[in-house]
């Protein structure tokens, strides 16, 4: 199959259809020769990492604990839940589980054993959630679980209730995804870092840029936010998780209903020690992800790296690396489509820095207005 011609998607070049009912970048959400059919697609997801000693809850694990999490779904429909023990150290008994107070079953049973490294998918739940609706998941862990797989910060407040009482948490434990049964919609997976995760936007407000993107459309697209704060394209990190290269198969390719992936990584490779100062290495990493995505018949989008002057590790030399990568992405055909985040966020008076109206205050992370500007770019 010939590769689609790459073009920038600035100024809404993707059009108003984008996964929400007809097309994403010119690709139909269903095959042209097949009638639309109901299928499971991922409408909410989070990428897991292994806990570190500072992650007290995930490291110590849980005994007779109930964890309550509120998830904001992009596309609605009848739901099922996915759980992952990718970084757990022992099989974990899970359940009972409820979603919006409805029982979640596993092969008709209230409990299931989540094997080390495994993923478990629930039965369909007797519940339909509207587009843009919230799903409150209550997860009981009899325990003791030992260390569990988790996502450190989803920028939404949940509750842990155990023998010590109740306490707030921004983490999600074991729960990795929500699928909906829908017709004519497919999933856009965003493989990203803190900017995608939501750093710079207010907690509990659902103003992360993938949320804003989904909210643009009357019939919302299904979007999987796979951002991990600090995550890199090339190198694994004990705290910031496996690199985009390492986690691509588990976090992206395993999702049901997938049509496209957006690779939005690179700034941490440049600014975090050890800094990657060879643009060719980053470009090779992008090319490898693009090849792997196309092997699975996915449209693959990329993003330029935004400005970061004012960030604690900014230097002119590192910014030169960023600009070299961006210039090559704009002039090459690494991706099928390019989202020029840099062009949208940069200050015209000083392109090395964010527009003041988009700066969360640290020089690197866009605020809610900047997140919305990214969403409008697709």
Image (tube, rainbow, N blue to C red):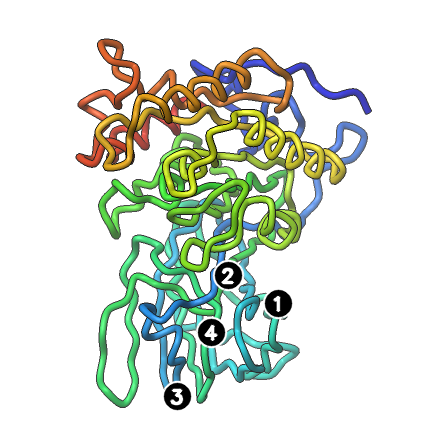
Crowd band around label 3 with a 10 angstrom C-alpha radius: few (<14), some (14–19), many (20+) = some
Q: Which mark is residue 119?
A: 1
Q: Is residue 24 above or below residue 232?
A: above
Q: Are marks 2 and 1 in contact (CB under 8 Å)?
A: yes
Q: Is residue 365 above or below residue 86?
A: above
Question: Which tag, 4 or 2, sits closer to the chain's start?
Answer: 4
Question: Which tag, 4 or 3, sits closer to the chain's start?
Answer: 3
Q: To which quarter of the image does residue 66 belong?
A: bottom left
Q: Quadrant of the N terminus?
A: top right
Crowd band around label 2 with a 10 angstrom C-alpha radius: few (<14), some (14–19), many (20+) = many
Indicate left or right for 357 with 3 as reference.
Answer: left
Indicate left or right for 207 with 276 as reference.
Answer: left
Q: Are marks 2 and 3 in contact (CB under 8 Å)?
A: no
Q: Which mark is residue 176?
A: 2
- Mark 4 or 3: in front is 4
Seen from the viewer's position, the closer of residues 75 and 165 is 165
Q: Which residue is mark 3?
A: 63
Question: Which tag, 1 or 3, sits closer to the chain's start?
Answer: 3
- Mark 4 or 1: in front is 4
Can residue 46 be spotted in the picture? Answer: no
Indicate left or right for 53 with 176 as reference.
Answer: left
Mark 1 vs mark 3, CA separation in Å? 21 Å
Seen from the viewer's position, the closer of residues 50 and 188 is 50
Q: Which residue is mark 4?
A: 148
């Amino acid at each position: 199959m010939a590769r689609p011609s790459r073009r920038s998607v600035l100024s809404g070049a993707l059009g108003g259809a984008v996964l929400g009912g007809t097309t994403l970048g010119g690709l139909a959400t269903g095959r042209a020769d097949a009638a639309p059919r109901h299928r499971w697609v991922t409408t909410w997801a989070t990428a897991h990492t292994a806990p570190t000693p500072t992650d007290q809850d995930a490291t110590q694990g849980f005994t007779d604990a109930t964890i309550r999490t509120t998830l904001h779904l992009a596309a609605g429909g009848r739901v099922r839940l996915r759980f992952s023990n990718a970084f757990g150290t022992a099989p974990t008994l899970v359940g009972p589980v409820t979603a919006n107070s409805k029982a979640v079953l596993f092969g008709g049973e209230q409990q299931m054993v989540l094997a080390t490294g495994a993923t478990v998918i629930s039965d369909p739940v007797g519940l339909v959630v509207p587009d843009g609706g919230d799903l409150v998941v209550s997860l009981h862990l009899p325990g003791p679980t030992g260390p569990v797989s988790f996502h450190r910060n989803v920028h939404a407040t949940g509750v842990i209730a155990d023998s010590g009482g109740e306490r707030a948490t921004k983490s999600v434990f074991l729960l990795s995804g929500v699928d909906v049964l829908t017709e004519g919609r497919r999933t856009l997976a965003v493989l990203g870092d803190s900017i995608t995760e939501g750093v710079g936007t207010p907690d509990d407000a659902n103003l992360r840029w993938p949320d804003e993107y989904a909210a643009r459309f009357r019939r919302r697209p299904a979007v999987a936010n796979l951002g991990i704060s600090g995550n890199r394209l090339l190198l694994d990190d004990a705290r910031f998780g496996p690199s985009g290269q390492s986690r691509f198969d588990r976090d992206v390719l395993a999702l049901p209903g997938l049509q496209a992936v957006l690779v939005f990584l690179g700034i941490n490779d440049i600014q975090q020690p050890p800094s990657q100062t060879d643009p060719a290495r980053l470009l090779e990493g992008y090319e490898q992800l693009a090849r792997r995505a196309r092997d699975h018949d996915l449209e693959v989008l990329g993003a330029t790296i935004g400005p970061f002057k004012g960030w604690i590790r900014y230097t002119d030399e590192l910014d030169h690396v960023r600009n070299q990568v961006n210039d090559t992405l704009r002039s090459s055909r690494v991706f099928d489509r390019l989202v020029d985040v840099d062009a949208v966020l940069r200050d015209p008076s000083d392109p090395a820095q964010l527009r003041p109206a988009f700066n969360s205050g640290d020089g690197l992370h866009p605020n809610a207005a900047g997140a919305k500007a990214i969403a409008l770019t697709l």
